[in-house]
Image (tube, rainbow, N blue to C red):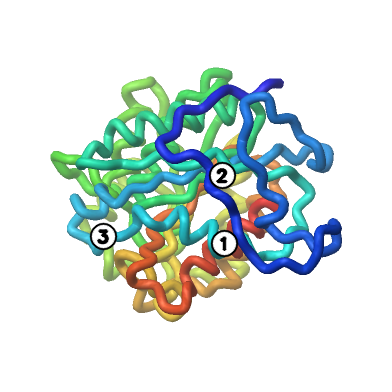
């Protein structure tokens, strides 16, 4: 199937990284990623492995509205910079479509543009990989998933969020704290029910009102203190069994602050990196991954690019 043309604000930029040679045995991400082209077809992808298309969502307007530390708009470039030097072991093609950016506070318009691009990629048989951006990125992703043929064809699509927060705030203006309540309301308006689960919830960082909203909506969640490897695996396996396809969103503040200092709200506790990585491997192995995004990297507050590097490592894991 031919891939559709996408409308982005910033075209793909050159990737860079360490050079060890031109042969396949030396290849790194920066040598493997190619610009996304409307007529692109898989050249090296293994059977059943959809080509991945990276799309940046340069936004921190949602974080600003949520009274967080702004700077996430610079995250897509930082994650690409961390991905570039990694050795390339993937059995699929990876393309870069460039960035959709939010400027002058026009969050909703930016989410709509990104959503349209995501829908087109999904319908073309690609695996969109969105690099946020604040967690307002999630509503852009939802618009793309909800507008895709997968939903139109009646697939049960679940939303799995790796996050310290529910992001179910009921606010008059959408922000990085509201996307999943927005999803629930949009699904209800469409005559559907949001299938939403969260791994890593920090009880001290979510009010009783947010827990009540989660319970009212039937949200499944696992607290950060309960996230042993076995517990997380069982929780995710149960959720995967009840859906046909999955949208995975990773808010990097689910990780401990020592691992991910460069976020709007660093975690005092967090979920250990090996547990989050194991969940990513589990999701990838399920064959149900429809769309994924990574959100909340703030390069301005990162230390030695730690947060960008762990984001890159998780993307690499999910695409293997």
Would you name the residue on which mark 2 appears? 54
User: Real-space Cα distance between discs 2 and 1?
Assistant: 12 Å
Would you name the residue on which mark 3 appears? 70
151 or 258: nearer the viewer: 258
Q: What is the x, y in percent for residue 23?
A: 85, 58
Q: Is residue 29 above or below residue 145?
A: below
Is there any visible trace of residue 170 in the rendered image?
yes
Q: Is residue 63 left or right of residue 270?
A: left
Secondary structure under the numbered disc 1 in the rendered image:
helix
247 or 238: nearer the viewer: 247
Q: Is residue 64 above or below residue 46?
A: below
Q: Mark 2 vs mark 1: which is more N-terminal?
A: 2
Q: Is residue 139 left or right of residue 6?
A: left
Would you name the residue on which mark 1 appears? 312
Residue 268 lies in what quarter of the image? bottom left
C-beta proximity under 8 Å, tags 3 and 1: no
Q: What is the x, y in percent for residue 167?
A: 31, 51
């Amino acid at each position: 199937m031919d891939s559709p043309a996408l409308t982005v604000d910033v075209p793909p930029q050159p990737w860079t990284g360490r050079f060890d040679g031109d042969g396949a045995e030396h290849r790194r991400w920066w040598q493997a990623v190619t610009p996304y082209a409307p007529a692109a077809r898989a050249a090296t992808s293994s059977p059943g492995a959809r080509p991945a298309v990276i799309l940046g969502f340069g936004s921190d307007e949602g974080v600003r509205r949520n009274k967080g530390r702004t700077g996430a708009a610079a995250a897509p470039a930082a994650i690409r910079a961390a991905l570039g030097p990694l050795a390339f072991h993937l059995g699929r093609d990876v393309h870069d479509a460039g960035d959709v950016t939010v400027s002058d506070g026009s969050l909703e318009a930016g989410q709509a543009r990104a959503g349209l691009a995501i829908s087109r990629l999904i319908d073309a048989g690609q695996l969109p990989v969105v690099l946020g951006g604040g967690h307002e990125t999630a509503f852009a992703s939802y618009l793309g998933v909800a507008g895709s043929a997968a939903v139109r064809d009646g697939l049960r699509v679940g939303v799995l969020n790796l996050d310290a927060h529910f992001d179910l705030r009921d606010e008059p203006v959408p922000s990085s704290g509201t996307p999943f309540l927005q999803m629930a309301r949009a699904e209800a308006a469409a005559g559907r029910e949001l299938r939403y689960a969260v791994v890593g919830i920090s009880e001290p960082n979510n009010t009783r009102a947010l827990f009540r909203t989660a319970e009212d909506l039937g949200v499944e969640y696992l607290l950060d203190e309960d996230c042993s490897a076995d517990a997380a695996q069982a929780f995710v396996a149960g959720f995967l069994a009840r859906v046909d396809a999955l949208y995975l969103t990773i808010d990097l503040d689910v990780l401990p602050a020592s691992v991910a200092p460069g976020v709007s709200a660093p975690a005092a506790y967090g979920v250990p990196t090996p547990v989050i990585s194991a969940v990513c491997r589990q999701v990838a192995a399920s064959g149900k991954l429809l769309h994924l995004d990574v959100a909340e990297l703030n390069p301005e507050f990162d230390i030695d690019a730690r947060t960008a590097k762990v984001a890159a490592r998780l993307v690499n894991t999910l695409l293997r």
